[in-house]
Amino acid sequence: MSGMTMRALLGAEFSPDPHASGTVFEVPFGEPMGLDAVAGCGSELGGPLVAGLPSDFADAALAGLAGDAEAEALPAGLLRVDRAGFDETGSSEMAFKLVGDLLRRVIAAQLHDDRDPLAVAQAVVRGW
């Protein structure tokens, strides 16, 4: 017996702003191609994903990006989600929360010269 693979795709751009009081998150959502549309995002983990972020998953993605009280916070600035993809059957709130957390950790590693973003990502995924 095997479980279903959770699938979610997020990408973002981070712009530091030393004058800001914290991190601002922009998580636009929508399904530009609509459900049952031709999938448009390639994936090495299965069939293509549908481009967009359904509103059902936006809050979970934001929760992962923002992290909890123990999570490493991003510096002051703007984190703008600029790409997303989902699977009509394999995506879930949990998948988007996990990928949001992963993306925040990788961006934080990129901002520190002494940390390898790939090693950080691999460690997070191994912990799942």
Image (cartoon, helix red, strand yellow):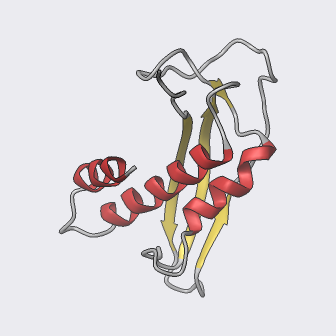
Name the spot of residue 42 as percent of width and height, x first.
50, 20
The residue at 78%/32% (across/down) is: 31
The residue at 55%/74% (across/down) is: 68
Name the spot of residue 100 as percent of width and height, x first.
54, 54
Quadrant housing residue 23: bottom right
Number of marks present in the image shown:
0
The residue at 49%/58% (across/down) is: 101
Quadrant housing residue 116: bottom left
- Pick the front one: 36 or 83: 36
- Pick the front one: 64 or 37: 64
Name the spot of residue 53 as percent of width and height, x first.
71, 39
Residue 18 left/right relative to 108: right
Q: Residue furthest top?
A: 38
Name the spot of residue 110 as percent of width and height, x first.
32, 60
The residue at 58%/68% (across/down) is: 66
Q: Residue furthest left?
A: 114
Residue 43 left/right relative to 19: left
Residue 3 left/right relative to 123: right
Image: 105 above or below 93:
below
